[in-house]
């Protein structure tokens, strides 16, 4: 009875009630959306690399090393010598290594020079390994394996020829046209920066660099043509970083120290987990702020409801007096207003959740391609249910304020309203 | 929600009293309203607003209560409705001493036995005409039951009453209540006061917003329906010209000794 009255009365004030519901819905959508993206990005972030015990580069800040070697953000300031890599890679504690050579780009995508070991040992998202969507891994010096996004965005198929530019900008000036690469395979989607990377062989990349050097430096060409020049590299090979897998994990700390104290070249070794945490703390302030802002928006939405209900009270004292005269108790009047608040909050929350899901389903391709965020559209998590319940409870609690006021009015007014 | 609470209570609490007390012929004329030595002030030290030695309304009686505004009429109605209780004396309605009941029981008693018509703005704006008429049955299982027995369903009884009050023709029933004329609104309010056959109908200046012609027509309808439902009518108005049509007319100033003493009293609309 009272609930039916509450719904009818709200329908009578469609406009205000509608605005209130919309503001609550938007607030709920924002709050849950931010939370969803926050959770997913944290998980996605942690999932970019797995199984790697150490990342080694030339002396640099750990965060910088992690960003360019794993996230392809920024450029290596210094390369490390091939000899140093070999020296570390041949130590007995080491199970595998993956050399990484960065610094080139192809139409906006980063080019990574590496070896077959990359496809063998690289792991992400809790131990998943890279799989090929089509084609195969490197067989020839000028083979390229594309990340899923690279192939999709640039519409490359297995067998296509690719020309690589030196430098990592969107527009490159020095094109290595003489030595085109051939697409040998395309990787399955991973949801990590691997998707946006073009993988080529270290040798292939070396030859590109040798050529481009020729263009400006006649001496390099001369050296190259000298006997034995091309084979072992008169121009000494260098790489940007390498990933290390150890035979036994507890050895990581010792190994890290040993590499950091390597005498022939200043090197930095980081444990990815630790540095990921550091980076996340930097990003974390932003996301905490985002959460605080969306929580405030929710507070504003609920406050809007409070204002809407409170302002309606004085004009509804007459209505309450009529209800009293037909037998409603002050508690009924209390319940009527509380019921309205509850109904508004629940409807707002439900609409907000619905809108969020529509938005997630609709916006998923965009989030994936533009932000590299992989949002799983599934049943809300316990945490999200908790947030929804929190919103509902807050709405009901706020409804107590106008409900109590009208209860007092109703006790004082009885059936006659003294205005 | 009122249905479930009333179902048990009407039978157990006061159902027995009512049927024994008012269904006319059985008991010897127990008054519907019986005020004895009543004294009421809004707050402890504020002036006494109502002081009535004796005031009775017999079953089926139509009483006209006249008094200027500020004479304590509205307070008297609040006492009869059980919204407030007197500091001294007793207010008995249908033999039940309202002062002895708790607030919730008084509210339920009012819902079960008294129908109200006010001066204006009687209707809930967001309910339809029929829903407005049915409203008391939502709060009183007894009246709901009586209405059902009379016409088969509460809605049918509402339509029957509206028809008797000439409110069932054309598209009147489908119109939003805010678009009805004042006279039509008052007739809807009368139907609401009468549904479920309460023993007492209290009308507080119900005709003061109507012109003379409509006033007479409204009174005719009200009298006819009260007689049909065997309800007593307590009609409050300051318009002396209507008094002649009632069984009894009372000048409230004469029975309210508080007024005789202090002239006018504040806190009245």
Image: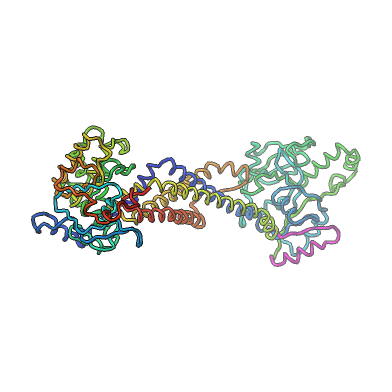
Q: In the figure, A123 relative to B237: above or below?
A: below
Check the image and tell me how it is coloured.
rainbow
In percent of the image, x 35 and y 62: which residue is there? B44
Look at the image and say whether residue B142 sits in the magenta stretch: no
Does residue A164 appear to the left or right of B126 in the view shown? right
Query: Is residue A321 at least partly visible in the picture?
Result: yes
Q: Position of residue A29 (x, y in %)?
A: 51, 47
Q: Foreground: A305 or A391?
A: A305
Q: Which residues are magenta?
A: A249-272
Q: Foreground: B190 or A28?
A: B190
Look at the image and say whether residue A267 sits in the magenta stretch: yes
Query: Is residue B107 at least partly visible in the picture?
Result: no
The image shows a total of numbered marks equal to: 0
Does residue A163 appear to the left or right of A340 in the view shown? right
Q: Position of residue B64 (x, y in %)?
A: 19, 47
In percent of the image, x 66 and y 48: which residue is there? A193
In percent of the image, x 75 and y 44: which residue is there? A141
Quarter-of-image position of residue A268:
bottom right
Does residue B5 appear to the left or right of B249 in the view shown? right
Quarter-of-image position of residue A212:
top right
Q: Position of residue A299 (x, y in %)?
A: 52, 51
Q: Position of residue A135 (x, y in %)?
A: 64, 43
Does residue A398 appear to the left or right of A251 in the view shown? left
Q: Foreground: A85 or A316?
A: A316
In percent of the image, x 36 and y 49: which residue is there? A418
Q: Foreground: B7 or B168?
A: B168
């Amino acid at each position: 009875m009272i609930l039916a009255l509450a719904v009818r009365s709200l329908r009578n004030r469609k406009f205000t009630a509608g605005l209130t519901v919309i503001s609550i819905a938007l607030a709920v959508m924002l709050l849950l959306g931010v939370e969803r993206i926050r959770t997913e990005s944290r998980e996605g972030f942690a999932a970019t690399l797995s199984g790697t015990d150490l990342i080694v580069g030339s002396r640099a800040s750990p965060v910088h090393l992690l960003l360019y070697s794993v996230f392809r953000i920024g450029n290596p300031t210094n390369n490390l010598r091939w000899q140093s890599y070999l020296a570390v890679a041949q130590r007995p504690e080491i199970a595998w290594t993956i050399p990484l050579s960065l610094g080139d780009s192809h139409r906006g995508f980063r080019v990574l020079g590496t070896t077959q070991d990359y496809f063998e040992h690289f792991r992400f998202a809790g131990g998943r390994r890279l799989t090929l969507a089509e084609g195969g891994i490197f067989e020839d010096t000028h083979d390229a394996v594309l990340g899923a996004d690279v192939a999709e965005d640039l519409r490359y198929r297995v067998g296509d020829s690719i020309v690589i530019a030196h430098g990592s900008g969107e527009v490159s000036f020095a094109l290595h046209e003489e030595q085109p690469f051939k697409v040998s395979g395309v990787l399955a989607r991973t949801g990590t920066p691997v998707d946006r990377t073009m993988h080529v062989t270290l040798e292939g990349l070396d030859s590109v660099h040798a050529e481009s050097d020729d263009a400006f430096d006649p001496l390099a060409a001369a050296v190259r043509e000298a006997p034995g020049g091309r084979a072992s590299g008169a121009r000494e090979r260098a790489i940007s970083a390498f990933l290390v897998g150890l035979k036994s994990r507890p050895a990581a700390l010792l190994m890290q120290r040993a590499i950091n104290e390597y005498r022939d070249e200043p090197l930095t070794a980081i444990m990815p987990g630790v540095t990921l945490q550091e980076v996340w703390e930097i990003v974390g302030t932003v996301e905490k702020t985002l959460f605080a802002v969306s929580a405030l928006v929710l507070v504003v939405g609920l406050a809007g409801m409070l204002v809407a209900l409170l302002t309606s009270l004085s004009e509804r004292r007459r209505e309450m007096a009529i209800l009293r005269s037909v037998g409603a108790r002050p508690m009924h009047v209390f319940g009527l207003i509380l019921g309205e608040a509850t109904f508004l909050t629940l409807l707002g929350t439900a609409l907000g959740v619905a809108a969020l899901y529509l938005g997630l389903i609709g916006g998923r391709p965009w989030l994936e391609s533009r932000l590299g965020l992989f949002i799983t559209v599934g049943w809300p998590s316990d945490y999200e249910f908790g947030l929804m319940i929190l919103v509902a409870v807050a709405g009901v609690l706020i409804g107590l304020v106008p409900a109590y006021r009208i209860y007092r009015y109703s006790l004082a007014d009885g059936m006659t309203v003294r205005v | 929600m009122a249905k479930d609470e009333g179902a048990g209570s009407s039978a157990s609490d006061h159902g027995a009293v009512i049927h024994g007390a008012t269904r006319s012929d059985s008991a010897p004329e127990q008054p519907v309203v019986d005020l004895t030595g009543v004294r009421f002030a809004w707050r402890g030290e504020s002036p006494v607003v109502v002081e009535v030695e004796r005031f009775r309304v017999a079953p089926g009686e139509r009483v006209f209560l006249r008094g200027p505004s500020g004479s304590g009429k509205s307070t008297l109605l609040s006492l009869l409705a059980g919204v407030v209780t007197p500091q001294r004396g007793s207010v008995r309605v249908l033999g039940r001493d309202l002062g002895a009941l708790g607030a919730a029981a008084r509210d339920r008693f009012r819902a079960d036995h008294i129908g109200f018509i006010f001066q204006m703005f009687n209707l809930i704006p967001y309910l339809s005409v029929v829903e407005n008429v049915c409203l008391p049955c939502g709060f009183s299982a007894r009246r709901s039951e009586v209405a059902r027995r009379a016409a088969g369903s509460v809605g049918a009884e509402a339509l029957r009453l509206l028809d008797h009050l000439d409110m069932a023709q054309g598209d009147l029933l489908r119109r939003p209540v805010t678009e009805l004329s004042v006279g039509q609104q008052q007739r809807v309010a009368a139907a609401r006061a009468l549904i479920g056959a309460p023993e007492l109908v209290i009308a507080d200046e119900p005709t003061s917003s109507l012109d003379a012609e409509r006033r007479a027509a409204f009174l005719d309808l009200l009298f006819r329906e009260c007689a049909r439902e065997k309800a007593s009518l307590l009609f409050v108005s300051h318009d002396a010209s209507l008094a002649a049509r009632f069984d009894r007319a009372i000048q409230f100033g004469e029975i309210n000794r508080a007024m005789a003493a202090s002239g006018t009293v504040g806190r009245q609309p």
